Image (spheres, rainbow, N blue to C red):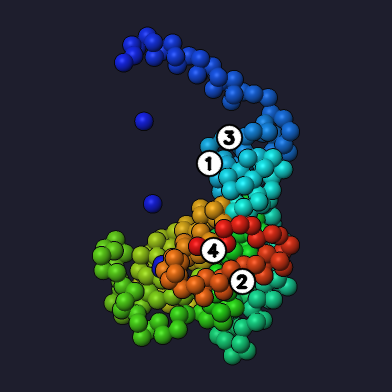
């Protein structure tokens, strides 16, 4: 659940520095060849289309080159990372979306709340979620949504109102709890806790501390809170494999905390990877 941081003279040093600087300059200015992105074969193409060799280029969103997590010059990431970027709207079709929610019980509140139209509207409003997203990452996102909400059945956490008090962390003085308000899980990834409601609300320009119930009333807003949590807390871990996303969403399940729920998340992820025609990669468990 989304409750859920190295005795020489100055002259000698300068003499040693010059060759290194020359090598660096020649390396950076080497001719760009071989990749569609325009990078040299040993450089990474970042999610924004720039070439480099640091984590900013070879980490999350890396499109081509020696991407971290098992990438190669063909652009395919073999472990973690997620592979080539795809169109979110073109990949999350009504058929794919409905194949998930149609597995929910017929009497679920989510049946009249979550919809493909609401998902796309939220994605169009919160565009950073769909930027350079891969089929693997889409599968991972919906695997967690499925587990957190039972196929988008639940809008609010079961027994949330009865346990609302435990979700108010009074030490988070920058985001004080409003009297009479509960910060239990709501939405596709069950946004939880006054800190998350406060931070998310600030990002979305919504006063979610004063009105956390809005997440359970507005389906577009609900999806946007899930996108916020994912891009803020989960995405940077995805190049390590699906298992790292489990730890980011609900780490208490990991390291023997609840192996059965970990297995269910992995099962959903494998299923959705299959539906999207992509291999799940390695490091599936946390």
Q: How many numbered circles does the render carry? A: 4
SS at circle 4: loop
Q: Are marks 3 and 4 in contact (CB under 8 Å)?
A: no
Pick the front one: 224 or 50: 50
Residue ranking furthest to the top: 11
- The residue wearing badge 2 is 267
Disc 3 versus disc 4: distance between alpha carbons?
Answer: 31 Å
SS at circle 1: helix
- The residue wearing badge 4 is 285
Give the mark, 1 or 4, whose residue is nearer the N terminus. Answer: 1
Q: Are marks 1 and 4 in contact (CB under 8 Å)?
A: no
Give the mark, 2 or 4, whose residue is nearer the N terminus. Answer: 2
Disc 2 versus disc 4: distance between alpha carbons?
Answer: 11 Å
Q: Are marks 2 and 3 in contact (CB under 8 Å)?
A: no
Residue at position x 72%, y 68% in the image: 275
- The residue wearing badge 3 is 52
Q: Are marks 3 and 1 in contact (CB under 8 Å)?
A: yes
Disc 3 versus disc 1: distance between alpha carbons?
Answer: 8 Å
Residue at position x 58%, y 65% in the image: 141
Residue at position x 40%, y 65% in the image: 196
Mark 1 or 2: in front is 2
Q: Residue 41 location, x and y as percent?
A: 68, 33
Classify mark 1: residues with Cα within 10 Å, few (<14), some (14-19) or many (20+).
Answer: some
- The residue wearing badge 1 is 56
Disc 2 versus disc 3: distance between alpha carbons?
Answer: 36 Å
Classify mark 2: residues with Cα within 10 Å, few (<14), some (14-19) or many (20+).
Answer: some
Q: Is residue 51 left or right of residue 248?
A: right
Classify mark 4: residues with Cα within 10 Å, few (<14), some (14-19) or many (20+).
Answer: some
SS at circle 3: strand
Disc 1 versus disc 2: distance between alpha carbons?
Answer: 31 Å
Give the mark, 3 or 4, whose residue is nearer the N terminus. Answer: 3
């Amino acid at each position: 659940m989304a409750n859920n941081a190295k005795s020489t003279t100055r002259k000698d040093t300068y003499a040693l520095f010059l060759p290194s600087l020359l090598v660096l300059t020649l390396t950076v200015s080497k001719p760009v060849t071989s990749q569609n992105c325009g990078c040299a074969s040993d450089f990474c193409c970042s999610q924004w289309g720039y070439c480099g060799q640091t984590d900013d280029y070879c980490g999350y969103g890396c499109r081509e080159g020696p991407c971290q997590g098992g990438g190669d010059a063909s652009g395919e990431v073999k472990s973690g990372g997620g592979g080539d970027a795809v169109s979110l709207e073109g990949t999350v079709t009504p058929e794919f979306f409905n194949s998930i929610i149609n597995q929910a019980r017929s009497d679920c509140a989510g049946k009249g709340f979550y919809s493909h139209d609401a998902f796309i509207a939220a994605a169009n409003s919160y565009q950073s979620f769909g930027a350079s997203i891969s089929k693997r990452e889409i599968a991972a996102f919906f695997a967690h949504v499925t587990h957190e909400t039972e196929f988008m059945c639940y809008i609010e956490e079961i027994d949330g109102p009865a346990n609302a008090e435990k979700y108010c962390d009074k030490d988070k003085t920058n985001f004080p709890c409003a009297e009479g308000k509960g910060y239990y899980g709501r939405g596709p990834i069950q946004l939880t806790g006054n800190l998350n409601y406060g931070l998310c609300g600030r990002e979305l320009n919504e006063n979610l501390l004063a009105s956390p119930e809005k997440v359970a009333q507005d389906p577009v807003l609900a999806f946007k809170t899930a996108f916020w949590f994912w891009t803020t807390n989960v995405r940077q871990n995805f190049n390590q494999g699906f298992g790292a996303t489990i730890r980011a969403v609900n780490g208490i399940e990991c390291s023997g905390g609840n192996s059965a729920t970990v297995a269910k998340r992995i099962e959903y992820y494998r299923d959705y990877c299959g539906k999207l025609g992509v291999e799940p990669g390695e490091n599936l468990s946390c």
